[in-house]
Image (spheres, coloured by chain):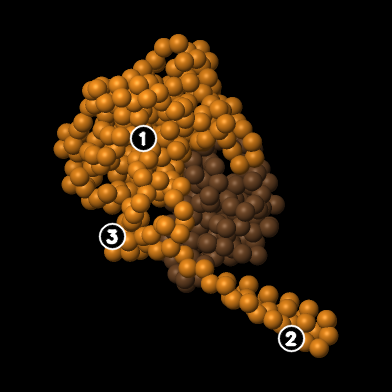
Chain colours: A orange, B brown
């Protein structure tokens, strides 16, 4: 079975909120002291793929990323975690392309890499949190998509997928090829690679392509605004005010308080 | 409720099985604000089991609603739900279609965005 896992490198979302800044002109988060890390849901996807391969006893896992040259670190880590091969599509355009652009680039790269039985994507990224790439990628590839999967089992010629919903789990069977978006679960916490495997990963080959190599509209991909454009970015400013209602008796104060609540909520 | 929608109107898509939960309330509130800003009306499409109950609960926020509660949609099935929502939203042609931050909506939003491709592929 051939598995493909898409990985996105993002700014570490775990930095303290007080250190988080946005650049309103470039409309993106400032890097500051934040490290670059692999998006956690993408790592959950890789861990799910590794466990699935271990259960079925065979299979080839390819890690794919579309990003800056630094995204190589995410792919090297994937190799250290025992992915079989890795490919990077260098993004020399808009640093934060919209999900449809990303889906088109990934779909073109997947077609170039060859057919896959299972394409796995994190359910959303910890930077922009759009959660759209998996579904759009499935549409671009013309494959069905199952979202919010946290466990994958082999079921003969089919896959048995456990999917998280807002109220519980659904168990689905799907026939490959299929795209799944992976969410986190206690069973797919990403493993920590051994130091030796990390060192060895830098000796393994890494496929690298530019947007021009994929046979897509590279100019459109570089613009990165196929779907939407971020026109403004700011951190919400929270304002706290304290008011005391007046009245001679408790009933008067209660009435004034109730009226104030109505006035405030009706203005929302 | 009326099902006539005009160019500046906004449609929200809700799932009856989930009830009027936090996601649905947030969606209704965001839809109300956007419709008011656009000077349009807010229309709800409520799909699946419990759709009539949810439509009644959200009636105080929306201007009109379409209840889709036939037996085939009683249990969530993405292709059927997507087909129903795509058809209804296409017919209504609102300014914007909003979906909530829930599992079903996050699954349906991307393919509904790509629905012209889906239709081309047949």
Instruction: Identify the residue at horizontal 37%, vertical 25% (top origin).
Output: A195
Chain hosting mark 1: A
In this orientation, which residue lies closer to the viewer: A101 or B77? A101
On the question of residue A115 being in view, the answer is: no
Instruction: Identify the residue at horizontal 43%, vertical 63% (top origin).
Output: A235
Q: Pointer 3: residues within 10 angstroms few (<14), some, or many (20+)?
A: few
Chain hosting mark 3: A
Instruction: Identify the residue at horizontal 49%, vertical 44% (top origin).
Output: B106
Which quadrant, please, contains the C terminus of chain A?
Answer: bottom right
Instruction: Choose top left, top right, bottom left or bottom right for residue A68.
Output: top left
Label 2, label 3: how far apart the Cα atoms are:
48 Å
In this orientation, which residue lies closer to the viewer: A235 or A12? A12
According to the image, label 1 marks what residue? Answer: A7
Label 1, label 2: how far apart the Cα atoms are:
58 Å
According to the image, label 2 marks what residue? Answer: A246
- With respect to residue A68, does B14 lie above or below? below
Left or right: A152, with A119 as reference point = right
- With respect to residue A88, does A158 lie above or below? above
Label 1, label 3: how far apart the Cα atoms are:
24 Å
- Of labels 1 and 2, earlier in sequence is 1
Count of all numbered marks drawn on residues in the image: 3
Tell me where residue A222 appears, x and y as whole percent.
21, 47
Q: Are marks 1 and 2 on the same chain?
A: yes
Instruction: Choose top left, top right, bottom left or bottom right for residue A228.
Output: bottom left
According to the image, label 3 marks what residue? Answer: A26
Q: Secondary structure at mark 1?
A: strand
Q: Pointer 1: residues within 10 angstroms few (<14), some, or many (20+)?
A: many
């Amino acid at each position: 079975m051939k598995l493909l896992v898409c990985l996105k490198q993002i700014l570490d979302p775990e930095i303290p909120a007080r250190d988080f800044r946005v650049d309103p002109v470039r409309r993106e988060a400032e890097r500051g002291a934040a490290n670059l890390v692999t998006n956690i849901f993408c790592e959950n996807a890789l861990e799910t793929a590794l466990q699935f391969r271990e259960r079925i006893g065979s299979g080839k896992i390819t890690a794919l990323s579309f990003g800056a040259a630094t995204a190589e670190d995410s792919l090297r880590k994937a190799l250290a975690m025992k992915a079989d091969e890795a490919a990077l599509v260098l993004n020399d355009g808009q640093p934060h392309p919209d999900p449809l652009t990303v889906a088109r680039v990934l779909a073109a790269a997947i077609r170039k890499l060859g057919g896959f039985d299972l394409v796995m994507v994190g359910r959303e990224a910890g930077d922009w949190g759009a959660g759209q790439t998996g579904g759009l990628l499935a549409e671009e590839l013309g494959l069905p998509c199952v979202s919010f999967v946290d466990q994958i089992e082999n079921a003969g010629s089919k896959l048995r997928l456990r999917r998280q919903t807002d109220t519980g789990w659904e168990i689905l069977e799907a026939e490959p090829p299929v795209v799944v978006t992976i969410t986190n679960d206690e069973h797919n916490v990403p493993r920590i690679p051994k130091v030796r495997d990390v060192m060895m990963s830098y000796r393994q080959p890494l496929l690298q392509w530019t947007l021009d190599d994929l046979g897509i509209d590279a100019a459109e991909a570089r613009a990165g605004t196929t779907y939407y454009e971020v026109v403004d970015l700011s951190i919400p400013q929270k304002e706290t005010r304290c008011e005391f209602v007046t009245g001679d008796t408790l009933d008067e104060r209660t009435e004034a308080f109730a009226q104030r609540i109505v006035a405030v909520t009706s203005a929302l | 409720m009326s099902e006539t929608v005009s160019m500046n109107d906004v449609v929200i898509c809700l799932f009856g099985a989930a009830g009027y939960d936090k996601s649905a309330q947030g969606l209704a509130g965001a839809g109300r604000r956007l419709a008011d800003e656009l000077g349009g009306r807010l229309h709800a499409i409520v799909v699946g089991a419990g759709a009539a109950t949810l439509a009644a609960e959200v009636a105080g926020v929306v201007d009109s609603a379409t209840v889709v509660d036939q037996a085939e949609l009683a249990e969530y099935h993405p292709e059927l739900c997507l087909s129903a929502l795509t058809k209804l939203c296409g017919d209504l042609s609102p300014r914007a279609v909003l979906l909530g931050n829930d599992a079903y909506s996050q699954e349906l939003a991307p393919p509904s965005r790509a629905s012209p491709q889906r239709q081309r592929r047949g």
